Image (tube, rainbow, N blue to C red):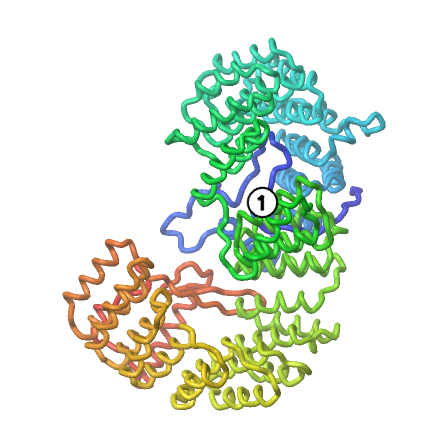
Amino acid sequence: MSTSALPLPSPPSTLSGHHHHSNLPPSHLSLPNPCLPSLEEPHPHYRTPTIRSRLSKLCQEGQPHIARQMFETLPRPTTVLWNTIIIGFICNNMPTEALLFYSRMRSTPSTKCDSYTYSSILKACANKRQSKFGKAVHCHVLRSNINASRIVYNSLLNMYSSCLLVSSVNSELSEVDLVRRVFRTMKKRNVVAWNIMIAWYAKTERFNEAVAHFRWMMKTGIKPTAVSFVNVFPAVSGLQDFRIANVLYGLLFKFGCEYHSDLFVVSSAISMYSQMGYLKLARRIFDRCLEKNAEVWNTMIGGYVQNCCYLEALKLFVEALESEHASLDELTFVAALTAVSQLQQLGIGEQLHAFVIKNSMASSVTNGLDEEGLMLVKEMQKQGFVVDSVTATALLSAASNLRSELMGKQTHAYLIRHGIHFEGMHSYLIDMYAKFGLVEKAQQLFEEMNDHLRDQATWNAMISANVQNGLMEEAFVVFGQMLERNVMPNAVTMASVLPACSQMGNAALGKQLHGHAIRHYLDHNVFVGTALVDMYSKTGAIASAENVFSRIPAKNPVTYTNMILGYGQHGMGATALSLFDSMQVSGTTPDSITFIAVLSACSYAGLIDEGLQIFYSMETKYGIKPLTEHYCCVIDMLGRVGRLAEAFQFAKELVDQDNAIKAWGLLLAACKIHGQYKLAKIVADKLLELDIRNSSSGYLVLLSNIYADEGNWEYVDTVRKQMQERGLKKEVGCSCIEISGCVNCFVSKDQNHQKCEDIYEMLAILAVEMMDAGYGPHHDSQRGHVCDSDD
């Protein structure tokens, strides 16, 4: 059987999150979804789940790559398992991985695709706007021997309607309308197919066709859904046909409350009548709606603005403000401000501005020179200067530094409204949204870019965005895509992706990246070298870290700090102090972070006198005022050797009480270790005084265990009751280890690992061997200790 050429897709530019390219609601296409509980839960007596349910669960937990690794171990996976991985990628917003996996499935002998395979992969084509790939899949469907179900045809309709450009369809020289062609080949059509077709005609401004298909659907006996009306109403407003509008709106009441009370339908009906100029009818529909969401309010206010009824728009906006149940968003305020602008009512505009500021919808800029920069921008606008690309760059940087989400969004909106584009704009925006924690928005911007527009800076920004937000695996995926697109990584790329290796505990991958850096002459770059030192230190390869450090020609303070910290973490305090001295001899000035590393090294190695000497020299010799973090290091250092009275005096010296909780917590832990229960109670009282606002459970657990060690069960019960009343529970610790390229994570009393039984069997063997060697558990007050987890 011949097969059509299958074009490979471009690498994915997003790992999570997606966006809609149309204001029309989804056409309710359904896919067999491993991210949803489609399978029955395993019977509690079954010891292990099926392979399919395990793969589905991994996908549901957002780990499709681990599911794929498990899939790779299967000798002859069935079509169902192939489909599970494909759908898992789609449900985790990784359509390109799904397309690549489908290509591999097609090339695997004795593996056949079924209807679920085709419908799923067509969904991926629609998400990625991959029309060529979708056409190839369409050919595969036609050439296969399967009897294509309606779900496949619906997926074809959705794919073509999502991928084809409106301009190409409306052009006289365009190809045949493939959406209509597929629709007409369907022998049996359900309401989903009709909805897609109606939405397609409305989207391509063929309003008569949209209304005609709605009528045709009714004549064939298919009952429309709420989505059907949402799709056809824009076509009616485009025709400006008041009679048809009334007929269709009347049908809503014929079909019942489920239809005319649907908020999407209400919003669409208000928009239809508003665009036709019948504001009284639109307002009547608005008033009949009992539970209005932000979209309903915005549509009605926007309808008034579109029809130049600015005063009515403002009155409705005030009504929304006064309503206890009104849901407003940024679009509501934009519409109100537009009305104020058209009315030229400066006083109302100032009141509205004050309201926005009062309700924290404007950012408060309070950070150094970034604030001065914003003041200059405001002054520029007052004097009539236009914001250009240079000013926009400064604004985006200021928003990132200040973590001012609103300012960043406003600047982004300004760029869009005024059509401002400049080199590096997308990398600035991706970096900004990542620092806000809005990594999905950053991924959306990345995805929207054409491949030829993604330069090194953009790829680097996306990798860094994932790392900053703890999405390590996604960072490696983006890095791999960068290589696949033949975009050469530079020093910034390597410095961005290497920290992910240490955080995942993946030393092998770090070594591969190091090899890549050597082959491309990047290892001598100070930023790459510093990242390598940090990576090797944190993955336990201190000798490799030393080797990299010695080869860096020009070291900066961060390079020295990472190496000193690495020595300290490996108990090599004397070596860390020696390097600290060498750093000063080389002319490199230590900074505040360097002293944290040095003091930590002294604490780990028990070099108390040396550590105190360095602490006292910070301000006198280096002009650096000790921060809370430095005090924590000294308190930990003294607490380890039992010098608790001195540690207590250091804790009392802390001025910034809001950040002193960790220092007192370290002192409390030292009191427990050395059995200083009287001092522990004093420290605990101070902690409870500081910790009321933070509701942290860790110190309460520690305090409970101290009381248990002392045998004071009454106080143990009191502390536990406090935790229960405040809804607190000790956070479970997690450890990770990388084996054969797969990162395994464990928590206390873990029952979810796939080799759980083998692990506990080995632990039992080790426990017996420890007992035979003369070691035993510590039984003192064991029953009074708060466990890590109650699960």
Crowding at dot 1, Cα within 10 Å, few <14 / some 14-19 / many 20+, comes out as some
Question: In this view of the protein, can residue 78 be seen by the observer?
Answer: no
The front one of 262 and 689 is 689
Q: Write down the residue under mark 1.
A: 410
The type of residue carrying mark 1 is Gln
The x and y percentages for residue 725 are: 24, 53
The x and y percentages for residue 414 are: 63, 43
Circle 1: element type: helix
Image point (74%, 30%), residue name: 166
The x and y percentages for residue 303 are: 56, 23
The x and y percentages for residue 480 are: 67, 60
The front one of 103 and 446 is 446
Question: In this view of the protein, can residue 163 be seen by the observer?
Answer: yes
Can you tell which quarter of the image residue 525 is in?
bottom right
In the rendered view, tell whether residue 757 sits above or below residue 416.
below
**534 relative position to 293: left or right:** right
**381 relative position to 142: left or right:** left
The front one of 719 and 143 is 719
Image point (78%, 26%), residue name: 170
In the rendered view, tell whether residue 395 sits above or below residue 26.
below
